[in-house]
Structures are given as C-alpha cells and as structure tokens.
Amino acid sequence: MSKINALCVYCGSSPGTDPGFVEAAQNFGKILAQNRVRLIYGGGSVGLMGALSNAVLEHGGEATGIIPDFLTVRERPRQRRPGQELIVTRDMHERKRTMFERADGFVALPGGIGTLEEVVEQLTWAQLGRHKKPILIANINGYWDPLLALVEHMRAQEFLPAGLRVDFLVAKRVEEILPKMSEAARGVAEAEKAMAVPLERL
C-alpha cells in the first residue's frame, strides 16, 4: 500500500483560451497545498504551469520544478521562494526520469503536444507493465474528450488488446483528483512504483 506524497502534473506553458483552465489549475494548486502533497511539474512560471505552481506556493505548499536547460529562456523558471525547488537538467530525458522518480502519480491538466506526449509516455510504460503509479486525465470542460474518444476507437479497432490494458483515471473536476489518485495508490505496493527497467536503459 502506498500514499500520494507528491504528484507530477503535466500542463500547458500557455493559459489556453478557456478561463476555466487557469481557474482549475489555481484551484488544484490550492488543493495540493492544503493536503500537503508536493507538486512536481515542468518548472515554468507561465501559462497553466505558472498558475498551478503559484497557487501551491501562495497557499503554503511545496513545488519542485524540473526543467531542461534549453527551455529556461522560453518557459522562464520561477525564481526560488519559500517552498520552491528548481532542478535544471541537461536534457528532456533526464527531466522525465527525475519527474518519474520523484512522483507517486501523474495528472494531465489541459496542455499542448508536450503535455500529450508526457502523459501518453506514462500510459505506454504502465500498459507494458513497467510501473503501477496511477495516471489521471483531468478532463476540464471536456478538453481531453478527443483523446478519450481516440482511446476508445483504438479499443474498438483492437489495437489495445485485452492483455495490454490502458488503465487510467478520469476526473472532470479538480476536486475529484486527489481522492481518485489516493484510492488508486492504496492498491500499489511501494516496490511496484519503481520503473521495472531503469529509465536510463530505455
């Protein structure tokens, strides 16, 4: 049985066009802080990443930003403040490995190609039995409806065989995220949270 002490949250470095996305990020940041769950995120101070991490810190929580060196100009990592840890990695591979190792689960808020790629990678490794950390799609205002429809289409076309299940959670409201993640984590032993094959070998 394991516990959610830190969550890796993937989300956009832009705010998007729907004000509900920023509001959701801010509310979730507050929830994380109130529940003493450390935020692991991409390190940027702009867009949903900025709104999320700022809310965590404003409410007394802790956040670890992990950003590759080449993105520090574009995404402007947050300057250190109480509760803030910043890790600058050599490349994306090191960033992903560090995020994986420090998180007890993964959440995808709205975002772009980078957000999609990161959460799909976690789904891929989970499907292949590499880890059992819970993964949740935060379908705020239906943002991820096309992705969820695509997964169902894959199932219908039998590109997702029963032996390789894609297990993930879905929440429509940020208030649902922690309860769902915590419940899923209870069924995962600490040893099962480690990557079965070290990431540096993949």
Image (cartoon, rainbow, N blue to C red):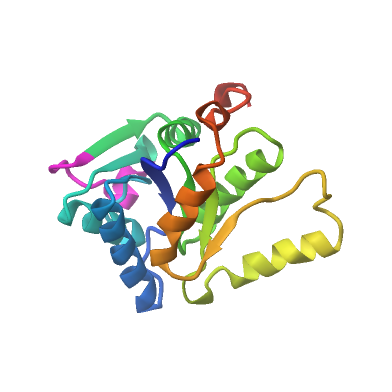
First to last magenta residue range: 71-84
Q: Residue at x 27, y 49 (%)?
A: 76
Q: Residue at x 53, y 48 (%)?
A: 184
Q: Residue at x 48, y 36 (%)?
A: 96
Q: In the depicted view, which residue is nearer to us: 194 or 46?
A: 194
Q: Residue at x 24, y 44 (%)?
A: 62
- In the picture, residue 163 is in which quadrant? top right
Confirm whether the magenta stretch covers residue 73. yes
Residue 102 lies, with reference to residue 16, above or below; the image says above
Q: How many marks?
A: 0
Confirm whether the magenta stretch covers residue 186. no
Does 111 sit left or right of 21 as displayed? right
Is residue 11 in view?
A: no
Does 13 sit left or right of 149 as displayed? left
Q: Residue furthest right?
A: 158
Q: Residue 168 appears at what percent x and percent y?
A: 61, 53
Does 132 sit left or right of 44 as displayed? right
